[in-house]
Amino acid sequence: MPSAIQIIKDEHRALNSVLLSLRVISRKAVYAGDKPDFPWLWALLQYVDRFAERLHHPKEELHLFRVLERRTPDIGRTIARLRREHAANAGHSIRMCDALADWERGDPKAGPFFASVASDFTRFNWRHMRREEREILPVAQATFTDADWREIDRAFAANDDPLAKSRSRKECEAALRHFIRVRV
């Protein structure tokens, strides 16, 4: 299996874990009527922005989708849908950042709104990642040449996502703590 496929799956797993954490932390705080650990939530959102939005999605579009469209034009509608979903992710992220900032300032409606958007974002991304792994990666594996895979492997290896490389809870927490230090 090309290394890019494993990297993509690892990055999907990492992103899904972050999104589930956003959802769980925010729901627990809302239901308990407590303030969440705001620095931790910001760190999770920074991870989504830095790795999913700025590295992972652009490389899927530039290296994976583009080559796949050239080699298999009949998959164009699926790729167009995935690109629209990538664009929609940016809107979810902006709403979550705005809601988190409002919640941190004490807006009583912002917490439930953040929890709702985090839930929606988690479900949306889970379906999106499942579609990529079930509909795109198998076609790419069957279609791409070794030269295609070498280029794609190099591109995704450069992401250097510390969370995707983590294999334990301790490693995950250490990777995310970097984002707390960056924000504070």
Image (cartoon, rainbow, N blue to C red):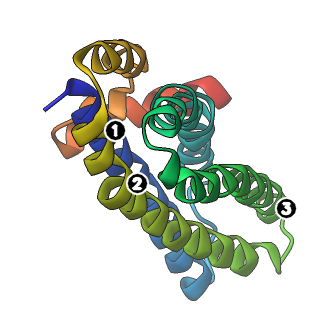
Kind of residue at disc 3: Asp
Kind of residue at disc 1: Ile
**Label pair 1/2, CB-CB below 8 angstroms:** yes
The residue singled out by tag 1 in the image is 8
The residue singled out by tag 3 in the image is 102
On screen, residue 40 above or below 162: below
Which one is closest to the eye, mark 1 or mark 2? 2
Q: Position of residue 62 (x, y in %)?
A: 57, 27
Which one is closest to the eye, mark 3 or mark 2? 2
Q: Is residue 171 visible?
A: no
Kind of residue at disc 2: Glu
| Number of other residues with Cα within 10 Å of mark 1, as a class: few under 14, some 14 to 19, many 20 or more | many
Q: CA distance from mark 1 to mark 2?
A: 10 Å
The residue singled out by tag 2 in the image is 132
Labels 3 and 2: the sequence-earlier one? 3
Residue 110 lies left or right of residue 154; in this view the side is: right
| Number of other residues with Cα within 10 Å of mark 2, as a class: few under 14, some 14 to 19, many 20 or more | some
Q: Position of residue 22 (x, y in %)?
A: 52, 61
**Label pair 3/2, CB-CB below 8 angstroms:** no
Q: Position of residue 74 (x, y in %)?
A: 50, 53
Look at the numbered disc 2 and give the secondary structure of its residue: helix
Of all residues shown, which one is farthest toward the bottom?
A: 31
Quarter-wise, where is residue 143 in the image?
top left
Quarter-wise, where is residue 96 in the image?
bottom right
Labels 1 and 3: the sequence-earlier one? 1
